Image (tube, grey):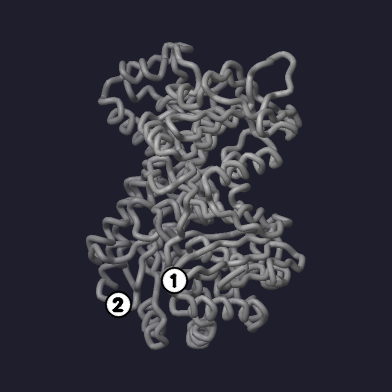
Amino acid sequence: MYLGVDYYPEHWDENMIDDDLNNILELGSNVIRIGEFAWHMMENVEGNYDFTYFDRVIKKAKEKNLKVIFGTPTATMPAWLAKKYPEVLSEFEDGSKRVFGGRRQYCFNSRVYNLYSEKIIRALASHYKNEDQIVAWQIDNEFGHEGSDVCYCNECKREFRNYLKEEYNNDINKLNEIWGTIFWSQTYNEFDEIPVPVKTITTHNPSLRMEWERFRSVSIEKYAKMQVELLKEILGEDCVVLHDFSGGYFDKSYDFSKVAKHIDVVAYNNYPVWGGQAQPIPPYEIACGLDFMRGAKKQNFWITEAIMGAQGHDVIGYLPRPRQAKMWSYQGIAHGCSSLMYFRYRGATKGAEQYCYGILDQDNTKRRKFYEVQSLFNEMKENEELVESKVEAKVAIVYDYESMASFRIQRQSFLMDYKNEVYRMYRPFYENNINIDVIPSDSSFDEYDILLVPVMIVHKPEVQAKMRKFAKEGKTVVLSFRNSVKDYYNNLTLNEFNPTNFTDFIGGYVEEIESFQGEQKITVSGVNEFNGINGTATVFRDLIKTTSAKTLFNYDDEFFPGLAAITLNNYEGGNVYYIGSGVDETIMDKLVEKILSDSNIEVIKSPKGVEVVKRTVNDEVKYFIMNHTDKVQTLGNINLKPYDALLVDSI
């Protein structure tokens, strides 16, 4: 278990390092994370590699018995590289270059940038090949963050066309047929006629746009894989390689889980609040992000940037209240974080992150935040075996990259937001204090009892087969609206009701659809065991004609009688729910209450805003308790101060 700080000694006078490292030790740290933004220090002119500064830092860290996580510096290219090779700079959709400044301005498909990335990584790794103080290597920084996942330059255009040639076996006629390019006279004679989907009149072909989304993901995956393979080649297969993923995982034009396959450790930069936010995001959204990171490889993850102070680049956000940032760290560890570093040791006084406050502020004085970190580290070191234990989950929520992309391409409703539909399913299980894995659709489902599948609009035979097998084992599958509408190429299917190839599974079919806008809602009313329970639905609605399924909720709509809103089908011994619209919390809570009861999954009741995570190590049960509210709360005989976090043996 590593506990420590993100340390940027190059930002300060070198004579401060000894005092800094002593303070970092006083916190209870055993690791520092360095180097990720220091390319120019390592290569100030082309080919002049100089690591002597970091040699001195590592030497001092070794004297203090502080381990090191070293970052490859490729997220921030040196100015000389951008000047000599301006083609490495990525482009906005309007064709303008992203100028040098900021960070992550590079194009993932730039052959020149890949070459120079390889050169600096090879030099860096070769220099530190025998340095035992380095316990892990971080590749780059927050791939795809801040819009860097998308580029429209000529290098991308060239590689996109090469990607399509490979995907379609160099057969332009096959591509034309699959994409339906006869529509609007878009038929291509050659691959080099295919555009990248920059702005045009009306919109581009949905199949082209889907392939563009896949290509963007492949571009980042290939660049990440190059870095991992290079480090493994030089340092050996047993070297630990990680990447620090940003938030926004449901909105990026790349699949985080594909990059995760190549690294040893998934790491996460966890920011429950950022500049311009008056309040942190809701606790269930924070938890979902943590569970997403754990689910990417189905193993514990690291937090490489935990918040302690107020954050922002140009606009500052909410200040975490006393105990609140520590509580978020507790929450991270409860959800499977087994090593944690705080961003940052000391807030900067120069550069773009002057308002990203750290453990120490610019006054360089130990105050409340310092001692909160110290207490967190001491408490976790006493429970190291528990921290490193596996999080056991019987519920999984499944996300699907192509489905996310399909909704980016054709949103269908201005109210549609993929992540909100994930949260709609996730929240009620979270509020019952159920451990949940958030997993990609290509994962195994075997270890779970309940499978939650929100808005999986792209139907994939292999995923549908896994869900059928899951239900046949007597388990529960919960699907939500717009399921199995599009094929792999983002097209509709002729002669098929929706959900495509799945109507027998849900015990019905979608007869009509409607997209809601603005404040538009519809009332839904319960029948059978839900009789007397009413609520509202929005975003979209599938009007379901049942065959074998039982209706649980109807739309209150005189024009479409007999078409259901929510159904339950018994499929070969398993329960298959279909939620046909974006229903409100009242209805979701009642549904989840039934689902958990029928599945015999333990519910832990707690006051609203008090989260409980059950963990087990060596058959011994422990409970992480987090009070996310600004009020005193009571759980059993346990009193919780505002934003308190505890680890207890019983509740």
Q: Position of residue 264 (x, y in %)?
A: 34, 59
Q: Position of residue 314 (x, y in %)?
A: 66, 58
For label 1, the SS is: strand
Is any part of residue 105 visible from this angle?
no
Specify the amino acid type for callout 1: Ile
Q: Which mark is residue 132?
A: 2
Q: Residue at x 43, y 53 (%)?
A: 82
Q: Is residue 377 left or right of residue 136?
A: right
Q: Residue at x 41, y 25 (%)?
A: 489
Specify the amino acid type for callout 2: Asp
Nearer the observer, 240 or 506: 506
- The quarter of the picture where the C terminus appears is bottom right
Residue 647, quarter of picture: bottom right
Query: What number of labels is visible?
Result: 2
Q: Residue at x 39, y 63 (%)?
A: 138
Q: Position of residue 126 (x, y in %)?
A: 25, 68
Nearer the observer, 443 or 121: 443
Is any part of residue 497 visible from this angle?
yes
Q: In this rendering, is residue 267 above or below 536?
A: below
Using a 10 Å C-alpha cutoff, classify the residue at mark 1 as few (fewer than 14 neighbours), some (14 to 19) or many (20 or more): many
Using a 10 Å C-alpha cutoff, classify the residue at mark 2 as few (fewer than 14 neighbours), some (14 to 19) or many (20 or more): few
Q: In this rendering, is residue 177 above or below 255?
A: above
Q: Residue at x 57, y 38 (%)?
A: 418
Q: Position of residue 19 (x, y in %)?
A: 52, 87
- The quarter of the picture where the N terminus appears is bottom left
Q: In this rendering, is residue 601 above or below 520?
A: below
Circle 1 residue: 34
Nearer the observer, 650 or 647: 650
